[in-house]
Image: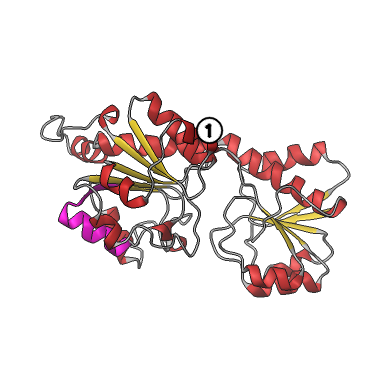
Amino acid sequence: MKIIAFGIRDDEKPFVDQWCQANPGVEVKITQELLTPETVTQAQGFDGVTALQLNPYADEVFEKLASYGIKNFSVRNVGVDGINPQVVAKLGIKVTNVPVYSPAAIAEFTVTQLLNLLRRTKEYDRKMAQGDFRWAPQISRELNQQVIGVVGTGHIGRVAIQIYQGFGAKVIAYDAFRNPELEKTGIYVDSLDELYAQATVVTLHVPLLDSTHHMLDQAAFAKMRPGTLIVNASRGPLIDEEALIAALDSGQIAGAALDVMEVETQVFNHDLGNRKPDYPAFNNLFARDNVLISPHRAFYTDVAVRNMVFESFQASRDLFEKGYSDKEVKF
């Protein structure tokens, strides 16, 4: 079997080498280039393709893969919203993802960012850089006093709940598909409106679907308690950024920690130097002391990167050798 891997970063290479050593019967080619209509020609002669990128995958990419006889496509992450399901279904291409690479990595990061919001770390860093070492007037809030509203109780949401409870915070949760074990604890509320009305922090752990696009909009923010904090390390378009800006301006929302943005490909994973991005909402939010923006790095740990490489490569091999994989995505 021959696998070609697109978008391989330097930090992935050691894990690719480890997987190859454990699978000597598979020939692997890697490239740092992303998978585009221009680079897809490199896949000719291969049996499977793995890729990882923030940019959506063009329909033409899959059409060319199919013309090369390639019907196995494995992404090294969980999100498949950049893939047109109608196109891959029509072409008979099977898609796998890595649904669970490290829930702890993302959950821990969201808690860390919330702590930074509560402790007003960005404001203190700015003051100290200017030689001001006074603590007043930036008084902090304690995590154990918060009501954490967890939206989505999948793998990541459940780990986040455990961490928040370890800090002594009250946790409530909403999920359209309740976890039976969590339900026994009485943690669930019956609606998002109920969660918004009670929570002092709203943290999102849901996929991007038509039903979740802009789930936090002007109407949702208006239903929240004044001074609520927002945390999002899931998908940027879950939040209407213009509505968030308005809610921050009014004080309805006291702050936000965002590891994802609506149009993050304009900024994230680029070295812009001193250039200001042509992204007004990003610039507005990034300039605020009560907004923390990180470049989609919640997943970025050694454990997660290893699992993303190993599981995607193994899924590609399984599709080729067995005709199926337990990581296959059912759109």
Image position, residue 243 (x, y; %): 27, 62
Name the residue tied to disc 1.
181
Amino acid type at mark 1: Glu
Q: Which residues are magenta?
A: 241-256
Tell me the SS state at disc 1: helix
Residue 328 spot, x, y in % from top left: 71, 53
Q: Main secondary structure of the magenta part?
A: helix
Q: Is residue 44 left or right of residue 110?
A: right
Residue, x 21% and y 40% (percent of image)?
123
Residue pictured at 10% horizontal, 35% vertical: 137
| Up-down relation of residue 326 to residue 158 (above or below) | below
Q: Is residue 291 visible?
A: no
In the rendered image, which quarter is residue 216 located in? bottom left
Q: How many numbered marks does the figure carry?
A: 1
Q: Residue at x 61, y 67 (%)?
A: 57
**Residue 219 appears at what percent x and percent y?**
27, 61
Q: Nearer the viewer, residue 237 or 225?
A: 225
Residue that appears at 48% across and 54% down: 269
Instruction: Quadrant for residue 128, please give it.
Output: top left
Does residue 102 belong to the magenta stretch? no
65, 99: nearer the viewer:
99
Q: Residue 284, position in %: x, y?
A: 26, 59
Instruction: Mark 1: give few (<14), some (14-19) or many (20+) Cα within 10 Å.
Output: few
* Left or right of residue 266: residue 248: left
Quadrant of the drawing holding the C terminus: bottom right
